[in-house]
Image: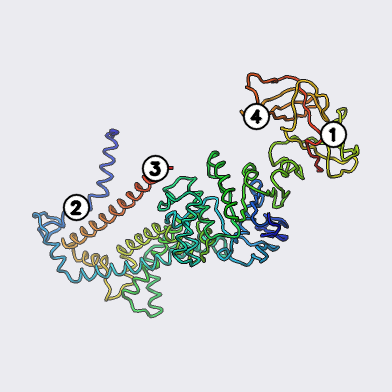
Amino acid sequence: MAEKPLIQFRNVTKRFGDFTAIDNLTIDIFEREFFALLGPSGCGKTTMMRMLAGFETPTEGEIFLAGQDIVPVPPNQRAVNMMFQSYALFPHLSVWENIAFGLKREGMPKPEINARVEEMLRLTRLEKFARRRPHQISGGQRQRVALARSLAKAPKLLLLDEPLGALDRKLREETQFELMDIQEKTGTTFVIVTHDQEEAMTVASRVAVMDNGQVMQVATPADIYEAPNSVYVADFIGDVNLIEGKVSATGDGTFALHWRDGAEPLRVKSPTGFAEGQTAHLAIRPEKVTISAERPAEAANAVQGKVLDIAYLGNLSTYHVELPTGDIIKAQTANTRRISRRDYTWEDTVWLSWTATGGVLLAN
Amino acid sequence: MKRLSVFNVVSLTFGFAFLYVPMLILILFSFNESKLVTVWAGFSTKWYGELMQNEAMLQAAWVTVKVAVFSSTIATVLGTMAAYVLVRSGRFLGRTLFSGMIYAPLVMPEVITGLSLLLLFIGIGLDRGVLTIVLAHTTFSMCYVSVVVSSRLATFDRSLEEAALDLGCSAAEAFRLVTLPIIAPAVVSGWLLAFTLSLDDLVIASFTTGPAATTLPIKIFSAVRLGVSPEINALSTLMITIVTVGVIAASLVSKRALVKQRQEEQEAVRTS
């Protein structure tokens, strides 16, 4: 990743009447990045994308593209192209003409247009369908036409609005890898908007988790998952156990979380400091909780409980374990053995354990 | 095939008889030998021959077609523009008032429209003739066009226009290259509607016409006041034929296009 910001949002606010869609947002997106805007619907991710495309103007603040303030630039003069959620293919034009559309507007000479369109058709494996109309091809092919059309003008920045939302699961997974491949080949900066966390985690080099018009965290997919900076992000991405308690320092970067009267405090390592007696949440992913019949000898944290529910996912099983305190903790294990040989079943008493570094401690 | 009950057969027969018997009688008597419209005296096509000799009638037909072509074309341009602005520009001051006003002429009695136009033309000193009929027909048919076009625009995917802008079109180019080709069927049917409305309008035309510009409906109406002649029957039969052929052709064309599109879609599903 080149350390040169291609896009800079500087204190951008967008209001629609009384509703604040984007709230004083500052963010940098770098060249050649595959950047994902992730959040629930209504969090402002689409508004951000539409401001980059030029379909919305910020109420306050500035947006820079390669150092130039693009707020006053109309959409047809920006070196930015967008792939629409509905694909927005022109139904009266063939696949070939759809891809050539933007190039013709540019006034590119005919031989160059032909060469460029052929190149795009090859890149998206659509050579056979060049003469077809959009309604004569399948959903997956339409998606690729939309991608080819938006890439044809070789934009500095490509925006993708829920690009895979209309595809079925299997095709979506294939297409995710195709997208990453194409992004690498063309070296274009991609900004993708999605509400599908798996999609964001798979394709993006950095993810911005958004909520209520604000960016909660910007980090690599691994950091977002392993080191969320807030309860919101931890809870939004994947599955998580959240245990609330009061913190006391035990030295050496380790803290004790007093979570229930009479229960043994939980031990967590945390790079960030906490005040004595501060309320905090321990966030621990289910797959980092080990389930066993006996109390493990050297576990930093161990609690006993009863299996309440088992969610069987084929490759994985998630055990919902009820503690004597009434709390429910989820533990996930890979099903390395056939289900008939499963060690624990409903109502069994089991031990759950995890290390001091397995979870993260988050202030409220 | 489902068998129809006696009740269904009877109601179908009555319904269609109600609609088509008058027209059938008119067609039948256009081939009548006798000059008396109500007395059958054998088959003949002589009234069609006489019609072709009738200069005044042919002149009126020519005026009617001219008026219909011009007024429906102008009405289509204006009506499409109005529809585009009302559907696209979102909220602006007086939008509700404007869209209400676009539809008002649809329910306005023709006599009032005709009279007010007449007063306007007299007021501004415009000589009545083909021009004034064209203006009058444009006025009342453009709201029909705008209704047809705006209902198409309401279901139009806006991201198509945004995609055109995104790919480098100015707003005008986006309209010309993307919006217009896609809404073209609605624009064409708006034009046809305006054309037909103009073709058979009597009331507004008679208010706004001048001595030099007699349209066919006016001509027929004044001729009938002197008694229905078989010649008029022949003319009406021709008009019915033209309209029927037109309607059937139009529906066949659109049906074939639909079937073709379905086939192509199935083909796409199979080959993917």
Total labels drawn: 4
What residue is pinned by disc 4?
A316
Report if residue B107 is visible in the image: no
For the C terminus of chain B, give its image quadrant. Answer: top left
Who's the residue at 26% across and 39% down the image?
B10
| Chain letter for the residue marked with disc 3 in the picture | B
What residue is pinned by disc 3?
B266
Report if residue A127 is visible in the image: yes
Quarter where residue A316 is shown: top right
| Chain letter for the residue marked with disc 2 in the picture | B
Residue A143, percent from left and from top: 51, 49
Q: Mark 3 is on which residue type?
A: Gln
Residue B229, percent from left and from top: 16, 62
Residue A219, percent from left and from top: 72, 48
What residue is pinned by disc 1?
A267
What residue is pinned by disc 2?
B25
